[in-house]
Each structure stands twice: as C-alpha cells, then as structure tokens.
Amino acid sequence: MSNQGQFGPIEYIAVEFPDGTVTADGFEQLLAAVDNGTIRILDLEFVAKAADSSLSVVPASSFDLTDFDLSQFDGAASGLLDAADVAAVGEDIADGSVAAVLVYEEMTLLPVLDAWARAGGRVITEGHISLDELATALNETENEA
C-alpha cells in the first residue's frame, strides 16, 4: 500500500483545562493513538489565558506533571495554527485556563483512500460535522420515526 502524498481526514479539537490544571489524563491515550498509527499529530499547541485575558502559546514542557512527561509533545507544531486561531480559542476559554489545541490526521482511512485512488477514484471534497450538527440530525431522525 502506498500512501505517499495521500492524507487522511484532518481534524482539530480544542480542550480547555480550567484554572490551568493540565493532567496526564487523555495525553497518555493520545500518545497511544499516535504509537499505534491511528492518528498523526500535525499540531499541538497549548494556549494560556492570563487573569488579565492576555493570551500566550506555551510549550508542553512548561507543565510539570508527576506521572507523565508532556515535553514529548514539544515541537509538534506544523504552523497550521496561526495567531487568529489562537485568538479564537482564547475567546472560548476562561481567564486562568489553558487549552490544548490539537490538529491531527486520521490515519485509519488511508487504506480505503489508497484503494479508491488505485481504482481511479479521487477525493473531491471533505469536511467536518460538529457535535451540535450531529445531535440535531439525530434528533430530527428520531422525531421522524
């Protein structure tokens, strides 16, 4: 199978850690997903919002966790997240909080995409469905039944 030049679906997620309390929970599973080839991290940035509402991007290594070394995520930056993205995330988090913003590639679909490409198919569009859109669609489906 040849996936050179082929990308899986690209997604992003931002998770707020209230009061700046970042824990290992979730990051261990994130590392496992990378290690087993489920996803590829394209960008992982930590956005901190100070008490005066100012924003900064801080390295993963600035969080001293006793049970997990976040510094292994330092340098996981592709430049996909820019100042406007940081500002948008900053609007959604509380003063004193930190948000982890993850841009990742879904690797599990690559064999399917590769097979379609070998058969002459090509991806013509892709997108993202938000959880709100999914909930609305599911509710409408239930109401029609």
Image (tube, rainbow, N blue to C red):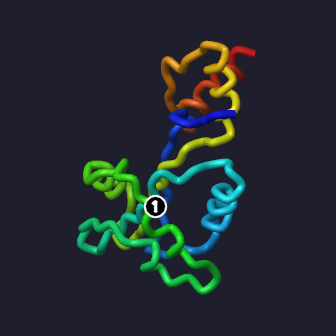
Residue 88 in picture, x, y percent from top left: 32, 50
Specify the quadrant of the image occupied by residue 50: bottom left
Specify the quadrant of the image occupied by residue 105: top right
Where is the C terminus found, in terms of image quarters? top right
The mark total stands at 1
Look at the image and tell me whether residue 22 can be seen.
yes
Looking at this view, is 131 or 48 the one in front?
Answer: 48
Where is the N terminus found, in terms of image quarters? top right
Q: Which residue is mark 1?
A: 76
Residue 38 in picture, x, y percent from top left: 67, 48
Specify the quadrant of the image occupied by residue 138: top right
Looking at this view, is 5 or 67 the one in front?
Answer: 5
- The answer to whether residue 130 is left or right of residue 34 is left
Residue furthest toward the right?
145
Look at the image and tell me whether residue 132 can be seen.
no
Look at 50% across and 75% down and name the residue there.
71
Look at 71% across and 55% down and name the residue there.
36
Residue 89 in picture, x, y percent from top left: 36, 54
Look at 54% across and 33% down and name the residue there.
6
Establish if 12 lies above or below 92.
Answer: above
Residue type, mark 1 in image: Ala
Look at 49% across and 17% down and name the residue there.
124
Residue furthest toward the bottom?
66
- The answer to whether residue 122 is left or right of residue 14 is right
- The answer to whether residue 78 is left or right of residue 50 is right
Establish if 99 lies above or below 142.
Answer: below
Q: Under tag 1, what secondary structure?
A: loop
Badge 1: how crowded within 10 Å, few (<14), some, or many (20+)? Answer: some
